[in-house]
């Protein structure tokens, strides 16, 4: 049956439409790429398996025939018709579409191969057609191609004999295919989706597996394995036919300091190193190409992150600037200036071009993105935007051992240019969190290690207490007191040197280094803020200056309104003269259409009575009005045009420019700490129309919309979430507005929840909120209990526990799956949402508001989300942490977070158990946050006012050169005489209570404060050991040893127990006499 199937059919409409498109490009005098040829030849010889598939003859056949290639076929394009000489099924397929000649300006004429005369008649007919239209005897050919086979080579000899001038028309064919039709862009979109799937599902997963398992895999072996997916796409669950897809090139994998960022690079036979890995993958779908490249970092340095982020920003700018009407050189110049302004050294390492046009040909040479290319970008074009830094040197001081001396960074994406936007077709995440890996020191391992270290430390302390108690019990009671004291002291010092003191010294040493680094970093930040250059920029930004001179104007069309986004100015024609207005002067703009004309009205900020302006006027405009109160101000300008295209476009650009300036000013306010949490107009939510929308049902929301409880469904759409209540109320949260997303499982919790901390607040009900939470209750917070006693083996009890356990597992899995789907959806618009999970093992109880809650760290925050109101502190914004009320005998302490932005009020968490202090210190030290401790609560409002007014806060001397504590060193609690005195007092109290045992006070002490006494004992010894001074040794010699105290305690216990036994015997006798006598109780005799 397969053998009898008919041959594939050609699309008649597509063939003639594209044929006429080629002729339209050829006939257009603006297209100099055709070099004024009068006819041209496209000759295909015998098939060659070694061909790359990017021959212009093959590309043109793909274009006309629809992903079909006709070998041994001659095509002769004359001014009015296309002549094709071929044979067999190829002739039959072309013959079937000859009906298109009736409606086409360009005709198709077929010639059939004739072996009887060796095709001499056919060759003569083709030469005659060429000469009939020839005046200058200029015939176009593909000069770089050498087709195989006698059939083609004999015809080439006939052309040579005719004496024609051969002109290379490779650029002309490329010019004709430059702008893609919608169906071509759809094929490129499919190619981009395939490239993304291969890159993520094959390369990234294989690379991560290799790194995790520490395998030794060669670059070329990994490349061959990836290329094998195109032969069997089912390996990555792709249902496309293998006949329609192929690899654009062998995937390029590079690492180990040897990098070639050209598209022609090859994967070497070296073993892949776990340092900087550059990977490129390209896929073709029905002949149309796409390409993607990413750079992955393993345990990178900060300088690597900064270099990558700069390239990421430049790459995004290049993509966004590819708009219809702009020239390639304008785009390249703007991106280059951005890099030069940020880092001139890296600008010198930029790749020679920023990419090229892409389509049926992988590299369209006429649309290479360079500063010398002045071609105008058109809607319908596709580009491979590929940028990189070549051979960035790494300083020895910053370079870990596993990193090379130099490294390179490459980013590439396939994009399509449309009228209103530039679409990315290879949506592989470029976020830093997705392209860097930290071996042994990543965030999760760090927190896990911190938790383990804290737990080990507490276990060690408990062992020390037990060992000390056992030693006291086993010591010889007849030994001299002084000997016992000396032995205990030596044992304590030995434990110090071997155990706790080593960890404490390590932490103190790290804190000292960290304090110094933070101080230097803060000084650099303050110097940058106070430098003349930055001040100049701020003054310029606050001043209304569009252009310093008219020579700075962009290229303008006469008598037309124009918007210069770079200078933030609107240029309008007044009496034919272009006059610029800074965007800060414009209040609003409106557009209307009347009498077959378009009207553009620009309203300016104009002072009213008393020289006042509206609330929406910028500070720069207010300053200008205050500076020139007596001048006249333009209130409005109007423009009329019969052609609506330009005014519509400029109206859109003015609106966009106003939005950008407003966002920038708000960001500056936030960075300077002067911003008020204003509501920001959000973009509209783009709904995902298919049924595969990630969804969570039966959720409750906090804060509530109205009433006691808000329940509904949460869905993840293209650019944000939509929560729909059961009453059909809607709440939209955009991915771009989410600063931190947190998923908290229901392990040891009553609820499982997803929490969003927003960048800008949104309205919920009638209030602004910056935190939104969606949760599901696992069990009710209170349950009704009956009087019936249940056995531990009660089937109903066991079934209830199993149901609860299963429900917890199910809810955790459902919420986790939803979070993973959201991360994949958000990656597609390059607004990656990464969910943090609180580390419960590092949690501790504290009081940030009025109630005691469990505070849990995440990678970026310290949160309490189960109870309302929520508590969230962003650790990245914390400058310093200070512990208050830390002194001997205190059961709890306070923790104060001081932010890098001194305009923000420090946050205090109160009543944290002293048992958590060491664990919290270890956690803060692991995440590189400086901390100090003190004995008193401080007035932080007054402290911050003083710090902000002190220009020498981070310096080690005051204005007179007198040494002073630098930065937060003034908060350190030193071992003063007052503290030693307090310890002596506590020790004296302890001795008095111990020696005075046997009375009522001893009973009360033992019954009420036994736990606290044991803790105090340990704290007392730790404090004295930490000091280790000669004075403390003398104090210890004067007081009793631990053995003496234990003996006194045992004696006191024995006396108390004997007294209790005697009292109980007396009480028993009294009651017994009362029962037997039946009369009044006898009087107690006095002893």
Image: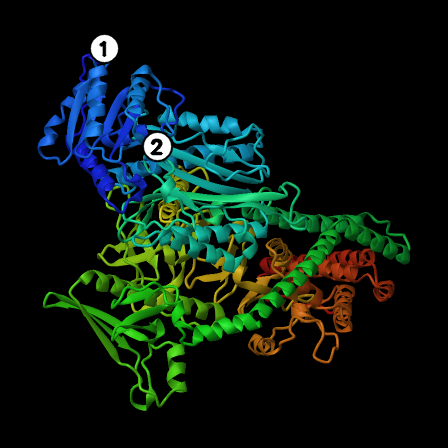
Sort mark 1 into few (<14), some (14-19) or many (20+) by Cα contacts within 10 Å: few
Q: Is residue 934 visible?
A: no
Measured from the top left, where is residue 162 in percent x and y?
28, 24
> Which residue is labeled 2 in the image?
284
Q: Secondary structure at mark 1?
A: loop
Measured from the top left, where is residue 232 in percent x and y?
37, 24
Measured from the top left, where is residue 311 in percent x and y?
48, 51
Q: Quarter-wise, where is residue 930 in the image?
A: bottom right
Q: Nearer the viewer, mark 1 or mark 2?
A: 1
Q: Secondary structure at mark 2?
A: strand
Residue situated in front as seen by the camera: 604 or 159:
159
Q: Quarter-wise, where is residue 781 in the image?
A: bottom left
> Which residue is labeled 1 in the image?
115
Q: Which mark is residue 273?
A: none
Quadrant where the C terminus sits is bottom right
Contact between labelled residues 2 and 1, with CB atoms less than 8 Å apart: no
Q: Quarter-wise, where is residue 250 in the image?
A: top left
Q: Which residue is at a point 30% across and 57% down the rendered structure image?
A: 732
Quadrant where the N terminus sits is top left
């Amino acid at each position: 049956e397969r053998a009898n199937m008919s041959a594939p059919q050609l699309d008649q409409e597509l063939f003639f439409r594209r044929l006429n498109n080629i002729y339209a490009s050829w006939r257009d005098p603006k297209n100099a790429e055709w070099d004024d040829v009068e006819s041209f030849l496209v000759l295909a010889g015998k098939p060659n398996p070694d061909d790359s598939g990017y021959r212009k003859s093959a590309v043109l056949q793909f274009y006309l025939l629809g992903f079909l290639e006709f070998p041994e076929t001659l095509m002769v394009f004359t001014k009015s018709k296309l002549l094709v000489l071929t044979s067999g099924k190829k002739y039959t397929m072309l013959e079937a579409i000859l009906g298109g000649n009736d409606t086409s300006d360009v005709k198709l004429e077929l010639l059939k191969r004739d072996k009887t005369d060796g095709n001499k008649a056919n060759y003569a007919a083709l030469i005659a057609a060429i000469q009939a239209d020839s005046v200058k005897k200029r015939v176009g050919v593909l000069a770089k191609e050498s087709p195989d086979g006698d059939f083609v080579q004999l015809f080439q000899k006939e052309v040579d004999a005719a004496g024609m001038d051969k002109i290379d028309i490779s650029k002309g064919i490329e010019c004709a295919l430059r702008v893609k039709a919608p169906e071509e862009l759809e094929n490129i979109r499919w190619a981009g989706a395939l490239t993304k799937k291969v890159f993520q599902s094959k390369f990234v997963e294989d690379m991560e597996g290799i790194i995790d398992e520490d395998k030794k895999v060669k670059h070329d072996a990994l490349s061959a394995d990836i290329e094998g997916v195109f032969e069997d796409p089912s390996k990555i669950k792709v249902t496309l036919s293998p006949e329609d897809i192929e690899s654009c090139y062998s995937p390029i994998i590079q690492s180990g300091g040897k990098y070639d960022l050209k598209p022609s690079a090859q994967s070497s036979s070296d073993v892949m190193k776990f340092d900087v890995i550059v990977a490129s993958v390209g896929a073709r779908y029905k002949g149309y190409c796409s390409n993607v490249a990413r750079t992955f970092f393993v345990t990178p340095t900060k300088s690597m992150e900064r270099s990558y982020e700069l390239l990421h920003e430049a790459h995004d700018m290049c993509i966004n600037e590819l708009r219809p009407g702009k020239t390639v050189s304008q785009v390249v110049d703007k991106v280059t200036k951005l890099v030069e302004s940020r880092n001139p050294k890296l600008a010198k390492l930029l790749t020679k071009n920023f990419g090229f046009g892409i389509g049926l040909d992988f590299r369209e040479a006429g649309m290479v993105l360079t500063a010398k290319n002045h071609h105008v970008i058109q809607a319908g074009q596709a580009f491979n935007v590929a940028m990189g830094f070549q051979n960035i040197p790494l300083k020895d001081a910053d370079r870990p051992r596993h990193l090379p001396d130099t490294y390179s960074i490459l980013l590439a994406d396939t994009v399509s240019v449309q009228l209103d936007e530039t679409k990315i077709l290879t949506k592989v995440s470029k976020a830093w969190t997705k392209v860097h890996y930290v071996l042994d020191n990543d965030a999760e391992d760090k927190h896990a290690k911190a938790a383990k270290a804290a737990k080990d430390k507490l276990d060690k302390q408990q062992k020390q207490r037990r060992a000390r108690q056992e030693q006291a019990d086993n010591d010889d009671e007849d030994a001299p007191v002084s000997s016992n004291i000396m032995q205990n002291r030596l044992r304590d010092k030995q434990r110090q040197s071997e155990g706790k003191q080593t960890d404490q010294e390590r932490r103190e040493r790290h804190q000292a280094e960290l304090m110094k680094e933070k101080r230097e970093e803060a000084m650099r930040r303050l110097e940058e803020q106070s430098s003349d250059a930055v001040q100049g920029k701020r003054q310029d930004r606050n001043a209304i200056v569009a252009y310093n001179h008219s020579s700075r104007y962009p290229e303008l069309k006469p008598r037309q309104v124009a918007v210069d986004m770079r200078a933030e100015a609107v240029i309008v024609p007044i009496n034919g003269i272009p006059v610029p207005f800074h965007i800060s002067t414009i209040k609003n703009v409106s557009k209307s259409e009347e009498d077959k004309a378009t009207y553009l009205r620009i309203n300016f900020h104009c002072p009213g009575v008393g020289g006042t302006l509206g609330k929406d006027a910028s500070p720069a405009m207010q300053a200008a009005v205050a500076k020139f109160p007596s001048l006249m101000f333009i209130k409005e300008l109007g423009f009329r045009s019969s052609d609506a295209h330009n005014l519509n476009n400029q109206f859109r650009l003015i609106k966009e420019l106003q939005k950008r300036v407003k966002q920038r000013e708000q960001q500056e306010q936030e960075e300077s700490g002067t911003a008020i949490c204003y509501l920001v107009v959000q973009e509209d939510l783009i709904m995902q129309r298919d049924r595969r929308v990630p969804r969570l049902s039966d959720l409750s929301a906090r804060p509530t919309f109205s009433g006691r409880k808000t329940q509904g469904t949460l869905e993840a759409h293209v650019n944000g979430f939509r929560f729909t209540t059961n009453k059909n109320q809607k709440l939209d949260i955009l991915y771009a507005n989410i600063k931190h997303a947190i998923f908290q499982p229901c392990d040891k919790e009553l609820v499982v929840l997803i929490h969003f901390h927003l960048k800008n607040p949104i309205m919920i009900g009638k209030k602004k909120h910056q935190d939104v939470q969606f949760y599901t209750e696992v069990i009710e917070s209170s349950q009704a209990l009956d009087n019936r006693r249940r056995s531990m083996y009660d089937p109903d009890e066991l079934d209830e526990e199993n149901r609860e356990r299963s429900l917890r597992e199910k809810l955790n899995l459902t919420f986790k799956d939803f979070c993973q789907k959201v991360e994949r959806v958000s990656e597609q618009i390059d607004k990656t949402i990464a969910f943090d999970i609180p580390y419960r093992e590092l949690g501790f109880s504290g009081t940030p508001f009025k109630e005691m809650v469990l505070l849990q760290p995440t990678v970026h925050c310290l949160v309490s989300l189960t109870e309302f109101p929520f508590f969230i502190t962003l650790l990245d914004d914390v400058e310093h942490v200070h512990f208050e009320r830390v002194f001997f005998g205190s059961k709890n302490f306070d923790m104060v977070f001081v932010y890098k932005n001194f305009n923000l009020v420090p946050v205090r968490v109160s009543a944290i158990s002293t048992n958590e202090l060491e664990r919290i210190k270890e956690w803060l030290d692991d995440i590189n946050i400086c901390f100090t401790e003190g004995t008193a609560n401080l007035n932080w409002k007054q402290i911050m006012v003083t710090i902000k007014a002190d220009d020498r806060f981070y310096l080690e001397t005051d204005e007179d050169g007198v040494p002073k504590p630098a930065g937060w060193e003034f908060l350190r609690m030193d071992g003063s005489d007052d503290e030693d005195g307090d310890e002596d007092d506590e020790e004296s109290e302890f001795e008095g209570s111990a020696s005075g045992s046997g009375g009522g006070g001893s009973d009360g002490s033992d019954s009420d404060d036994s736990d606290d006494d044991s803790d105090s004992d340990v704290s007392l010894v730790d404090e004295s050991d930490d000091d280790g001074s000669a004075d403390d040794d003398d104090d210890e010699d004067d007081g009793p040893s631990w053995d003496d105290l234990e003996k006194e305690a045992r004696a006191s216990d024995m006396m108390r127990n004997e007294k209790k036994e005697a009292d109980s015997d007396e009480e028993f006798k009294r009651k017994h006499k009362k029962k037997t006598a039946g009369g009044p109780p006898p009087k107690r005799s006095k002893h």
